[in-house]
Amino acid sequence: MTGAIRAELLKFFTTRLWWGMAIGIFLAGAAFALLFGLLFTGAFGEESMQGMPTGDATQVANSVYTGGLSIGYLLMLTIGVIQIGSEYRHHTITSTFLAQPHRLRVIAAKVVALLAIGAGYGLVSLAGSVLVGALVLTARGEEAFPSGDVARTLALSLLVLGLWALIGLGVGILIPNQVAALLIGVGVAWIVEPLLGLALRAFEFGRENLAPYMPSEATNAIIDAVQQSPDQQRLEWWAAALTLTAWAAVLAGAGSVLTARRDVS
Amino acid sequence: MDSRSTGARVEVRGLTKRFGGFTAVDDLTFTVEPGRITGFLGPNGAGKTTTLRMALGLVRPTSGDVLIDGQAYADLVSPLSVVGAALEATNFHPGRSGRDHLRVLATTAGIPTSRVDEMLELTGIPAFARRRAGAYSMGMRQRLALAAALLGDPRVLVLDEPANGLDPEGIRWLRGFLRMLSREHGKTVLVSSHLLQEVSQTADDVVILANGRLVREGTMADLQGEPSVLVRTSDASALAEALNARELAVEPGGDGGLVVRTADPRVVGDVALAAGLPVWELTPQRADLEQLFFSLTEGTNRNLGPVAGATREGAA
Ligand SMILES: Nc1ncnc2c1ncn2[C@@H]1O[C@H](COP(=O)(O)OP(=O)(O)OP(=O)(O)O)[C@@H](O)[C@H]1O
Ligand SMILES: [Mg+2]
């Protein structure tokens, strides 16, 4: 089993994908920290604050440090899809299953590896965002670390990225055509799902019982960022973390069941 | 190769695979013996690859099973050290080097990296293997696949059309290599091919498949039949008499020739000389393998309709 996990990490680090992603995630973290750092501290003038999402100092700091996650979790979704999709695409799944015929162990190894990769990229993202964000906040006369809750958010952002990679893994198994899986996965996560969340907010039942449990809403709740409308229904950070974990478990779990039964030819 | 491991028996028992209503493999039963090379033959679409994939636990049989050393593949404790398989020539990520591909497999199975480099030496691609696999030629891929199959020093080798894409020198190298593995190391070698001649020089046994069914199983020698010698002379009946006197069986060979049941043309020449008859032709013969294979599997290629089959063969 540890062999299978190390093999999954080796698979990831022996193609060029990993450093491209690392650069992307670092830059996204830094760029969003700069943008949000200026935006939420009113650097563009008081009138520009109108209609802006608002929150207390902790929420502002959270938003600045985790702004890059909106790009980061899409990249992790992509990584999750590719970790299995490229095996189908290039037929390496055959040699993978020959070396480890217990398919559930292979999927379990991918799950562990992706959580580790997610945490690793989380650190890369934070390296960019905390560096830039703390500078901007300090320069704007705000407190860079207003409370201990910020540390919790930073730690949870590592988990968020890992969980989105698992969602990607599930999508990659459910849709064995890698290109289709990438297009559908990113399309749904980036556009369809947030729109659906908005639509659900249009009526009371959806607003209170459905929308907060959508993956992107849960993601925002975990990191406890600023809000468009502060009265908006939102899960506690731990409930949101459980919700996103449930999404990851359902998708990766469905994928595991399929993987165990599917013919490899 | 370092080890003295001996092969293991592979038993295919009542194996059937249906894809929807289509029966790709139909109640197949045969045994592959250790220390021998078995040719697994059949025309395109006969069901060879499907059978091998079922043997390796990749495709789930509709019924029947395959035992390797008495166990299903999935139950083998250390599968790569029991069976090494090379199924398709394209099993590599184009962006990963061949060596890294082997390292991934070795890591999964707990095989040291030093073994990876040994296998790359053995298959003659140590330098190439550090480049990205996307640039490999077909022959390189075959060698890399073979190196992957040998990683765990397996007792059984399963190779699906390993000669595809190899140049004549590569094919000769492969033959020698497989012979060495089976003769000197006692390994079980199962090689698929759609050409009987291709394996005729290497295989000890053959299993021939057509339409997913077994049509022939036996030794290569049995399949090739008794050797004989075709001889032509001025007076066939006089020569036949002389040969009969030496207790050699003779049949008319068409066009005034005689077919003598012997492996040794010199005997026939000596008899003719002693009888004072001229020898116009003296040819050792074996069964025409191409013809034999065709007659065994004839008209059974279900992937090609009769008309389409004719045109495709013409084009090939
Ligand atoms: N996943 C699948 N779904 C449907 N039909 C399949 C599937 N896999 C194989 N077949 C069919 O089963 C038959 C046997 O295929 P198989 O690949 O085993 O033949 P083969 O003997 O290896 O042929 P070749 O010499 O061309 O490699 C073919 O008619 C093929 O079309
Ligand atoms: Mg085949």
Image (spheres, coloured by chain):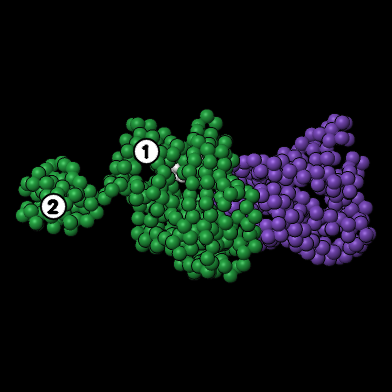
- Packing grade of label 1 (10 A; few <14, some 14-19, many >=20) is some
Name the residue that disc number 1 marks. B297
Left/right placement of residue A76 relative to residue B302 reads: right
Occupied quadrant, residue A66: bottom right
Q: Which chain is green?
A: B
The chain carrying label 1 is B
- Residue A240 in the image: state x and y as whole percent: 86, 46
- Residue B221 in the image: state x and y as whole percent: 34, 50
**What residue type is disc 1 on?**
Thr
Q: Which chain is purple?
A: A
- Packing grade of label 2 (10 A; few <14, some 14-19, many >=20) is few
Residue at 59% x, 40% y is: B60
Left/right placement of residue A128 relative to residue B140 reads: right
Name the residue that disc number 2 marks. B281
Q: Gap in Å between the C-alphas at discs 2 and 1?
A: 32 Å
Q: Quadrant of the C terminus of chain B?
A: top left
Q: Is residue B284 visible?
A: yes
**What residue type is disc 2 on?**
Glu
Q: Secondary structure at mark 2?
A: strand
